[in-house]
Image (tube, rainbow, N blue to C red):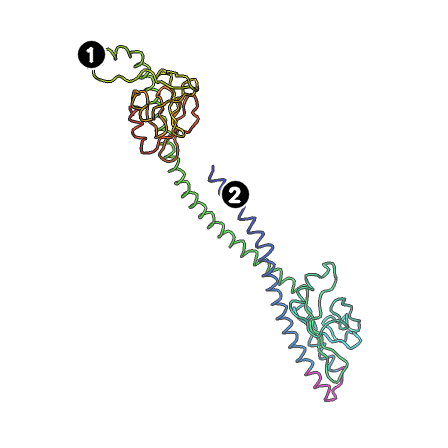
């Protein structure tokens, strides 16, 4: 389920990003470039045609050939060519149409609003024509645009080249559709590659997470065992305390010289001496070279002995030297939790004023102390 969401989000993100990049950046630029090149080629071709026709016609007129005969020849040559992308026509200087592929226009005035003879350059560029086609009114009835013109020597005639807007637009649209198809196929291929890379990376990180989870589960299991051992040991100590008198008598029988652990510690509260029973001690710690003894009820007392001296006088079955600053009582340990990579943290009852940390070097000794 988790992988399905990753693939879904990856696909959605890629599709949105790809559409934005292609639709708003790449596709318009490529269509503009290709269309401009197409129009420029048409303009260059039209310029060559009107140059050749104007030169030939001018030479013929110079030989006193009848003007109307020449116009009829031109009309015959260009008749029906308005279906092509580029076609020619002849105007006079007043803008009257003398020859045109569409004979119904002959004798009429040129009515084009954009590139008329009176306001256009002799030759437009492909980029100018492309911008004009993009910005033109879609409701316009004009089917052509003047793209080049040249006067005929020895006459008042002008050879004019037109571009068939419909044909050019069809070519641009066809190229646009081809690009969309190419980008669609390319996008599908890239998407498959992205999903494969995503799957590879997700599997790699899943293995890492599974490994860390396994280590964490091992740590939790070890802590569970440790806390179980703590409970068992505390129960054993409780049973041991119930039979203390019997064990002391047995030890007395075995040897009279063996030292018996203290049953009380002598402490101070302000200027008063205060003996504390060993079983009432929760933990002992050192702060600013002063030894503090904390009882189960949370009250704190000071002691004159150092931590080493105090630990030496305590029963090692009941007390453990957690670190250089702390001694903890077995029956006051509330919980053992993992701390860092290898250390353990002891939570006491009552809650200790300082963090009691068992370093990784003493963890094994602590576990052994709990009979693990």
Q: Position of residue 15 (x, y in %)?
A: 54, 48
Q: Position of residue 371 (x, y in %)?
A: 29, 23
Residue toward you, 133 or 63: 133
Q: Nearer the viewer, mark 1 or mark 2?
A: 1
Report the magenta residues as a range. Answer: 55-68
Categorize mark 2 by other alpha carbons within 10 Å: few (<14), some (14-19), many (20+).
Answer: few
Categorize mark 1 by other alpha carbons within 10 Å: few (<14), some (14-19), many (20+).
Answer: few
Q: Is residue 10 visible?
A: yes
Residue toward you, 238 or 287: 287
Left or right for 209, reference 38: left
Image quadrant in which you'd find residue 142: bottom right
Extreme residue in the bottom direction: 63
Left or right for 254, reference 240: left
Image quadrant in which you'd find residue 337: top left
> Could you tell me which secondary element the residue under label 1 belongs to?
helix
Instruction: Please tell me whether the stretch drawn in magenta is mainly helix, strand or loop.
Output: helix
Q: Is residue 319 above or below residue 161?
A: above
If you read the primary sequence from the N terminus, does the residue marked by circle 1 or circle 2 appear first?
Answer: 2
Kindly identify the residue that appears in the image at 41 percent across and 25 percent down. 347
Residue toward you, 342 or 173: 342
> Could you tell me which secondary element the residue under label 2 belongs to?
helix
Residue toward you, 257 or 335: 257
Q: Position of residue 223 (x, y in %)?
A: 36, 28
Kindly identify the residue that appears in the image at 26 percent across and 10 percent down. 246
Extreme residue in the front direction: 271
Kindly identify the residue that appears in the image at 47 percent across and 49 percent down. 194
Q: Which residue is mark 1?
A: 253
Quadrant that contains the C terminus: top left
Q: Position of residue 34 (x, y in %)?
A: 59, 64
Q: Which residue is mark 2?
A: 9
Is residue 203 one of those drawn in magenta?
Answer: no
Q: Is residue 225 visible?
A: no
């Amino acid at each position: 389920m988790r992988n399905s969401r990753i693939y879904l989000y990856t696909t959605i993100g890629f599709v949105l990003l790809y559409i934005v990049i292609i639709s708003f950046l790449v596709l318009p630029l490529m269509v503009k470039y290709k269309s401009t090149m197409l129009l420029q080629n048409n303009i260059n071709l039209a310029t060559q045609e009107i140059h050749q026709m104007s030169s030939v016609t001018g030479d013929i007129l110079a030989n006193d050939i009848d003007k109307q005969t020449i116009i009829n020849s031109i009309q015959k040559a260009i008749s029906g060519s308005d279906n092509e992308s580029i076609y020619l026509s002849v105007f006079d200087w007043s803008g009257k149409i003398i020859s045109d592929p569409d004979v119904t226009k002959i004798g009429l005035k040129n009515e084009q609003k954009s590139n008329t003879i009176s306001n256009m350059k002799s030759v437009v560029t492909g980029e100018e024509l492309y911008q004009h086609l993009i910005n033109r009114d879609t409701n316009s009835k004009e089917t052509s645009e003047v793209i080049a013109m040249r006067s005929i020597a020895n006459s008042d005639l002008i050879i004019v080249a037109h571009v068939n807007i419909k044909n050019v637009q069809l070519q641009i649209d066809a190229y646009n559709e081809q690009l969309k198809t190419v980008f669609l196929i390319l996008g599908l291929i890239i998407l498959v590659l992205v999903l494969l890379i995503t799957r590879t990376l997700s599997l790699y990180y899943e293995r890492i997470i599974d490994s860390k989870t396994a280590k964490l589960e091992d740590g939790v299991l070890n802590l569970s065992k440790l806390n179980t051992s703590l409970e068992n040991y505390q129960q054993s100590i409780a049973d041991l305390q119930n039979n203390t008198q019997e064990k002391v008598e047995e030890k007395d029988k075995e040897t009279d010289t063996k030292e018996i652990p203290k049953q009380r510690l002598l402490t101070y509260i302000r200027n008063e001496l205060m003996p504390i029973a060993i079983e009432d001690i929760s933990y002992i710690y050192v702060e600013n070279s002063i030894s503090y003894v904390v009882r189960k009820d949370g009250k704190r007392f000071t002691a004159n002995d150092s931590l080493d001296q105090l630990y030496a006088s305590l029963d090692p079955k009941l007390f453990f030297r957690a670190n250089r600053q702390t001694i903890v009582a077995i029956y006051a340990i509330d919980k053992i939790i993992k701390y860092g990579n290898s250390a353990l943290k002891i939570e006491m009852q009552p809650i200790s004023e300082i963090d009691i940390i068992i370093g990784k070097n003493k963890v094994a000794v602590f576990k052994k102390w709990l009979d693990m």
